[in-house]
Amino acid sequence: MSRRIELYQQWKYPIIIGLLLFSLVFSKWLLTVVEFLLVLTVLIDNNSRKRLLKSFTSPLVLSLIALFVLHVVGLLWTQDFDYAGKDLKNKVPLLFFPILFYAAGTLDLKTARRLLLMFAGFVLLLPIFTLLYHLLVPNSGTFVAYGQSHIRFSLLICLAVYFILYFRNQDNKIFKILSIPAILLLLYFLFRLESFTGYIVFFLMLFFVPVLLWRKINRIWIRIMALIIPISISAFALWGFFNVKQNCYPPIEKIDFSTVDHRSAQGNYYTFDTNMYLAENGHLLYVYIAEQEMQRAWNQRSSHRLDSTTDRECNMLMRYLSSKGLRKDSLGVFSLTEKDIHNIEDGYTNYLQPELDPYRERIYRFLWEISVYRENNDPSGHSLTQRFEYWKAARRIIAANPFFGTGTGDISNAFKDEYELMHSKLNPEFRLRAHNQFLSITVAFGLFGLLVFIYVLLSPFILKKIPDILLYSGFIFIFLLSLLNEDTLETQVGVTFFALFNSFLLLMFPSNKKESGNEKK
C-alpha cells in the first residue's frame, strides 16, 4: 500500500501537467476540467497546502500574479462589470498557475524534460492526423489545425520545434534520429497553415535560436548549417516577395479613356470606373465591364451560376479575367480555358495563383489587401489591413485615456465608440480589439498598466529566478513576438499557453545547479 502512495506522490503532478499539455493542443473543455483537478490535488495534499501559503511570500510568484491583480484593480474605474467579469474569468490562469505550480514543487530534470517533449509530441500528432485525413480523403480542402486557431497553433508548433532542438543533444540516439523528421513535419504543417504570424515567428527564430544555443552546438557542421539555413530561408523569403510583386503587381497599364471602345462585340455598353486603380497582373480591374453579358456567358460555361446578388463571385470572375488581360464581357469569358473555369470555381482570383506555394499565396493576398485599402480605405475582411484600423483606433483611445486607460470592462465599448467617431468603413462584424497585446493593455490600463505588464514580463530576469535561462529565453521570445499582432492574452488558450509554460519553466523546472526544491523561488 505504501508503494502505491509513493507512486501517487511521485506521479500525480506530472500526470496532471501532461493532461494540461494535451488539453492545450486538443480540447478547451478538458483544459478547464484538468485545471480544477490541479486545484483539488494541491488542496488535498498537506505539503502542497503548506507551500501554497508560502507562495505569497515569493517575490517571483507575486510578480507573476501582478498581471491578474492589475485586472482586478482596473475594476475601480470601469463601468461595464459584465464584460469585466468575463475578462477576469479568462485571466484566472494568470493567478492560479504561478501559485499552484509553486505549491506543487519542483520536478526532477528527467521528468520535466519528458513533459516538454511530450507537449512537442502532442503538437506533432495534429499534423500526423491531418496528413492521414488528407491522404484518405482526396480533395478534402485546405490544411487546417482542427479545433485550433491557425495562428495559435502556429505558435505551439514554433515552441514544440524549439523544445525538440533544445533537448536534441541528450544521450538518446533514437530521439536524435526521430527529431529530424518530426521537425520537418512540423515545419511543413506550419508552412501549409498560411499563418503569417507563424511565418514571422519562425523566420525570426532562425536567427535568434542559433545565437541562443551556440554554446550547446558542439559540431562544426551543425554550426555551419545554423548559419546556412537562416541565410537560405531569408533568400527564399525575399525571392518569394519580389516574385509575387513582379508577376502579380507590376506597374499598372495606362489607358487613354478618350479612345476606348464603348460597346462590347454584342453591342452592350461598357462601364469604366476611372477613379479606381485596382489591378491584377497590371491590368485594371474596373474597366471594360459588361456585367450582365459577362454573367450570362459564365452561366453557359459553369454550373456555378452567377446573378445580380452574387457580388463576391462576380468580383472574383472580374479579377480573374483582368489577370489574363481579358475584358469583362462574353468574349472574355469564352476565352477562358476549362482549367480557368475550374480555378475560378475553386475561388482563385488570378490565373497565376494555383502555381503559388502557401508563402507566396499569402504575400499575394497581403499585397491585394494593401491595394484595396489604399484605394477605398475599407479594410473589411482583410486580416492585415484590418489591423491597421485596429491600431489606429487603439492609439486614439490611448490618447484620450493616457494614464489609467478605460478600465477592465470598458475596453470593448471604447473600441465600438471609437470606430463610430472615426467614421470607420469596417463592417460591424470586423470591429474588433487592437490585435496587439501591448496596445490592448495600454487601452485598458493606460501607461501605468503598460509598465506593470512590462515588469511582469521582465521580472524573472530582474529577480534572477530562471532555472534554465536558455530554455526560458526561447519560450519568452516566441511569446513576445505573438503579442505584436495578436491579443494573445484575451482567449482561454492564449492565456493558458502563457501562464502554463511561464509558470512551469520558472517554478517547476529544476535549476541547472539544483534539480529539486522550491526554496530559492
Image (tube, helix red, strand yellow):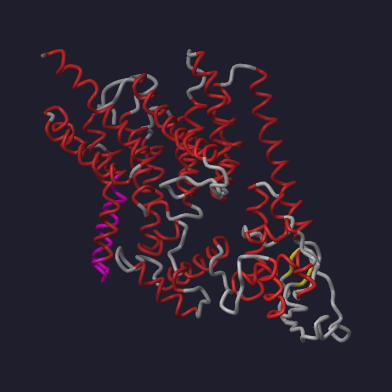
Q: Residue at x 44, y 31 (%)?
A: 120
Quarter-wise, where is residue 18 in the image?
Answer: top left
Question: Residue 276 versus residue 419: which sits nearer the camera?
Answer: 276
Q: Is the N terminus in the top left, top right, bottom left or bottom right quadrant?
A: top left
Magenta span: chief secondary structure: helix
Q: Residue at x 85, y 83 (%)?
A: 261
121 lies above or below 4:
below
Instruction: Write the start and end of the magenta stretch as one range.
Output: 65-82
Question: Could you tell me residue 464's position as x and y percent?
Answer: 38, 33
Q: Position of residue 477 (x, y in %)?
A: 49, 41
Name the image quarter holding residue 17. top left
Q: Residue furthest right?
A: 259
Instruction: Return the x and y of residue 481 as percentages of the image width and height.
Output: 51, 47
Q: Is residue 224 above or below residue 495?
A: above
Q: Is residue 507 left or right of residue 183?
A: left
The residue under the point 74% across, 54% down is 244
Q: Is residue 23 left or right of residue 50?
A: right
